[in-house]
Image (cartoon, rainbow, N blue to C red):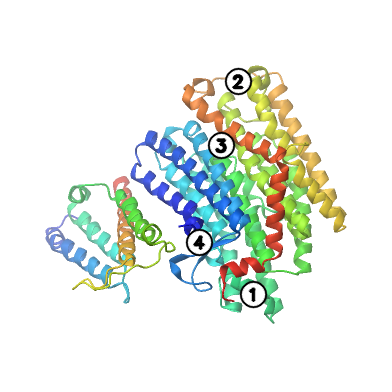
Amino acid sequence: MMQQVVTYPLLFQLLLSIILMFVWRRIDLQRIISICGSLVGVALSGWLFFHVWTNGTQTVQAASWDAPFGITFVADTLAATLVLLTSISGLAVSSYSSASVIPARLRFGYFPIFHFLLLGLIGAFLTGDIFNLYVWFEIIIISSFVLITLGGEKPQIEGAVKYFTLNILASIIFLTAIAVMYGLTGSLNMADLAVIVPKLENRGLVEVAAILFLIGFGIKSAVFPLYFWLPASYHTPPSAVSAIFGGLLTKVGVYALIRIFTLIFLDDILLDDILLIIAVLTLFSGAIGALVQKNVRKVFSYLIICHIGFMIAGLGMFTEAAIAGAIFYLIHDIIVKTNLFMISGVIYRIKGTINIKSLGGLYEKYPKLSLLIAIPFFSLIGIPPLSGFWPKISLILAGLDTNNYIVIGGIIFASLLTLIVIARVWSEVFWKNPVKLPKREHFLYFEDMTNLRKVQFIAPVVFLTLVSLYIGFGAEHIQQISSRIAGELLNHGEYIKAVMPKS
Amino acid sequence: MKTIILRTASNYLLPILLLFSIFILLRGHYLPGGGFVGGLIASIAFVLHAFANGLKDTKKLLKFHPGYLMPAGLALSFLSGLLPVVGFDEPFMTGLWLHHPLPVIGSIGTALFFDIGVYLVVQGVTLTIIFTISESA
């Protein structure tokens, strides 16, 4: 039984969405199933993480076809950690959506699709086959497209078209890259590719494939020249949907980049330089973009882009410390970004708008809630000892080691601008004198919610804040996990051996 | 399109097409065919019936909303994949087969139930889409 634990979180999400489809019309029942199911999902992912932590990389050959012919599911520490984080965010957003998403949207299958999205994310983290990775990406895109258009408001459709066009383009480029790789090597298993690719003679074509992967995943993770779809679409759907998108969707792209460039395409100086340049430009453009936005959720969207730069910078420097920093940042970022978008939803439900100009006086009215919100804000900026601080230190130290002073400059600049942006949001939304807003008709205000809904609404924010506090104060543990992941990524012999024991 | 010829023909075509779809479904393991094509043919049977007799009659014939075929088929496929995990500690989707083939149907294994699941999902999706479109038109 222990070997199969790798696929349990995956299978459980599928089971959950099937059960939810059977009760399509009963949204009250769907809420309960989704929340309880997500709790079980967290438990299963925790079990997987613990199992991997004590016993090392685990694999399952689906349908008993041995690698490299069958599809392998590989849970190394990186995959197990990300699966755990996905389940934690999923639990928070599940509870949050049952309070904040209006019943008219829930009736059209919100919860089944939401769990399909989690299924896609978990599958993408666990798979060891590059074509299978593409398939999980498709599952993610299709379910996220349903979630982003659910409700069918005009701005939603506009955002969805942009989102869909660019993501399909990314998928096509990704698929082309897979085709090139398959033509070169005759294999799709990532561990097998890691063995074959370094021996290939045709280095030019390998480089082309690497660049194609970089562009495909670059669009998905919203790095510098390819990020325009993100701020154009993430502010349109309900904030519960933005929360899961902001927390996890771009991170899958980052995960894929980390996996591909630590396993298959190694020792490529050109690529490392490209990654560093992209990282610095992403840091700059995201931070400057966030500075001028008036819509709270658009500000957060640009901050997502900006902070992707930290992880790419860590990958570009390619030392053990730098990758450990990038992984630490990834862990911190998933939790904090999910939380941020949920907070934007809380502000929206309290005031009825998320335009910075017309908000204000939140601190006066809800002092406790505001102090709670301050914690994720401070973690995001990286005020010691909160969670954003530690990975930045690792990244800056790694930059000093490798003499990448421009990258250090970028990191410091982006951190500073994040501070300014968050300070501006804080003073405008929480401290400024309140502007008199007209009451909106047919709008679910926070005050009008029942007590149960209020708990379902605020508890996830508290929960994720506690998780970020743990990441900050228990930084030693997280650093231990990240260093182990970085070690595993850089010595990928073990990964290959786990997938193909015979070779 | 309520012509008497089509209506009479569709009454005979519906069972024949359904039988044919099951034939296609069963032969699909080694030969061209399988759950996907079988499901499409089965839904063509119902669509033809709806063209000839009107949507209301077809819905009466089906007795339940075709949308429920989707979770039912998914569940069947999922459980056929899960059986080796739960019962035999084998990886997900490992094929399990009965030792002796049955007459007419042939060997019975989890792959067959997976395909029946696909058959149901395809029918559910196609009929839901077509019924929704023709309702709103």
Give the spatial CA distance, label 4 vs label 1: 23 Å
Going from the N terminus, do you reach mark 2 or mark 1 first?
A: 1
Going from the N terminus, do you reach mark 3 or mark 2 first?
A: 3
Q: Secondary structure at mark 1?
A: helix
- In this orientation, does residue A406 appear? yes
Give the spatial CA distance, label 3 vs label 2: 21 Å
- Crowding near the residue tagged with mark 1, few <14, some 14–19, many ≥20 C-alpha atoms within 10 Å: some
Going from the N terminus, do you reach mark 4 or mark 3 first?
A: 4
Residue beneath disc 4: A135
Give the spatial CA distance, label 2 vs label 4: 46 Å
Residue beneath disc 2: A437
Residue situated in front as seen by the camera: A257 or A295: A257
Residue beneath disc 1: A195
Residue type at the position of mark 2: Leu
Q: Quadrant of residue B100?
A: bottom left
Going from the N terminus, do you reach mark 4 or mark 1 first?
A: 4
Q: Secondary structure at mark 2?
A: loop
- Horizontal side of B118 relative to B46 (left or right) equals right
Chain letter of disc 3? A
Observer-side mark, 4 or 1, equals 1
Residue beneath disc 3: A239
Give the spatial CA distance, label 2 vs label 1: 63 Å
